[in-house]
């Protein structure tokens, strides 16, 4: 499938976030976990700046992606280094998720002025992907971010990055530890080898387009399996 992608803006606050009602999937995670690399891997070009120096970006980078339909990928500031608040998630991240479920200002359906018909204002779809390093399962900062995200958005999923750095036996152990720490399914990816990126697209499509997601673990597991089934 053809993928088009462009950088839109670096957002410092609510005024800079997208407003056209297209679904948004935000990547959240510690600095250096591989958010920018995952975006580059997904869109198969280097649009997101990757860095070996952690904790630099305090802005949310917004990318518009066309892949069948349009959606936004949002690279949120990394947490886990000095500069975040005491919960680790900075004000841009909180402002970003503060919009979840709020009307987007977009109207769908027919509504003719004077017809008396009210058009429904559609809430913007905001989903979150929590990226965690496959080599460090169950870090307190990641667990705290996951708890916070689950209270902030209806749709979220966990992705384990840098899976290429683990040998087969270590992977199985790490994934088991991750799933048990988060009590949720975890999708392993590598931006270096490309492993898991097709499944990540399926998961993103699912989060962006499927309105009836449930937080119950059994359903989330089913959702993830369905989304990543061949
Ligand atoms: P961000 O701060 O979360 O956006 O992290 P980056 O995408 O900038 O990645 C931080 C560092 O990890 C860079 O040196 C990347 O090359 C490296 N990295 C990211 N993803 C992977 C991966 O899947 N495998 C490996 N081996 N390295 C990765």
Image (cartoon, rainbow, N blue to C red):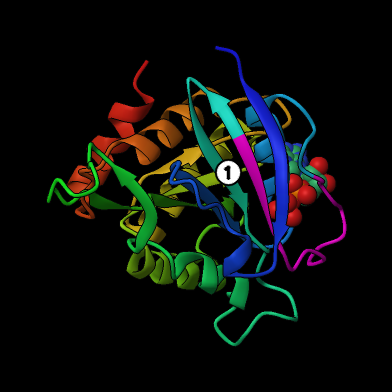
Where residue 39 sits, quadrant-wise, is top right
> Residue 55 placed where, x, y %?
78, 67
Q: Nearer the viewer, residue 9 or 206?
A: 9
Disc 1: CA contacts within 10 A as few (<14), some (14-19) or many (>=20): many
Extreme-top residue of the structure: 1
Q: Is residue 182 left or right of residue 172?
A: left
Residue 56 part of the magenta-drawn span? yes
Q: Nearer the viewer, residue 129 or 75?
A: 75
User: Does the image show residue 106?
Assistant: yes
Ligand 1 sits in which quadrant? top right
Is residue 83 rendered magenta in the image? no
Report whether 41 appears left or right of 49: left
Q: Where on the picture, by quarter, is residue 195?
A: top right
Quadrant where the N terminus sits is top right
Q: Secondary structure at mark 1?
A: strand
**Camera-side residue: 149 or 13?**
13
Q: Is residue 165 visible?
A: no
Q: Residue at x 40, y 61 (%)?
A: 181
Q: Which residue is mark 1?
A: 73
Q: Position of residue 156 (x, y in %)?
A: 39, 52
Q: Residue at x 34, y 64 (%)?
A: 102
Magenta span of residues: 49-64
Q: Give the residue at x 58% y 35%.
A: 189
The quarter of the rendered structure image containing the C terminus is top left
């Amino acid at each position: 499938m053809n993928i088009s992608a462009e950088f839109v803006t670096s957002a410092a606050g609510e005024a800079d976030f997208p407003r056209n009602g297209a679904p948004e999937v935000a990547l959240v995670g510690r600095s250096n976990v591989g958010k920018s690399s995952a975006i580059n891997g997904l869109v198969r070009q280097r649009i997101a700046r990757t860095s070996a120096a952690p904790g630099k970006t305090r802005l949310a980078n917004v990318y518009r992606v066309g892949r069948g339909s349009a959606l936004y990928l949002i690279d949120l500031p990394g947490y886990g280094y000095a500069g975040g608040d005491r919960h680790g998630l900075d004000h841009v991240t909180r402002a970003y998720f503060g919009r979840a479920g709020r009307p987007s200002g977009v109207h769908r359906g027919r509504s003719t002025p004077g017809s008396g018909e009210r058009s429904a204002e559609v809430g913007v779809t905001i989903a979150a992907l929590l990226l965690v390093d496959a080599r460090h399962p169950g870090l307190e900062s990641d667990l705290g971010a996951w708890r916070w995200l689950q209270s902030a958005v209806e749709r979220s999923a966990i992705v384990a990055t840098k899976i290429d750095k683990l040998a087969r036996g270590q992977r199985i152990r790490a994934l088991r530890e991750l799933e048990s720490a988060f009590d949720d399914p975890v999708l392993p990816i590598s931006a270096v080898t490309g492993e898991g990126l097709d499944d990540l697209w399926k998961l993103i499509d699912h989060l962006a387009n499927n309105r009836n997601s449930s937080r119950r673990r059994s359903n989330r597991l089913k959702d993830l399996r369905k989304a990543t089934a061949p």
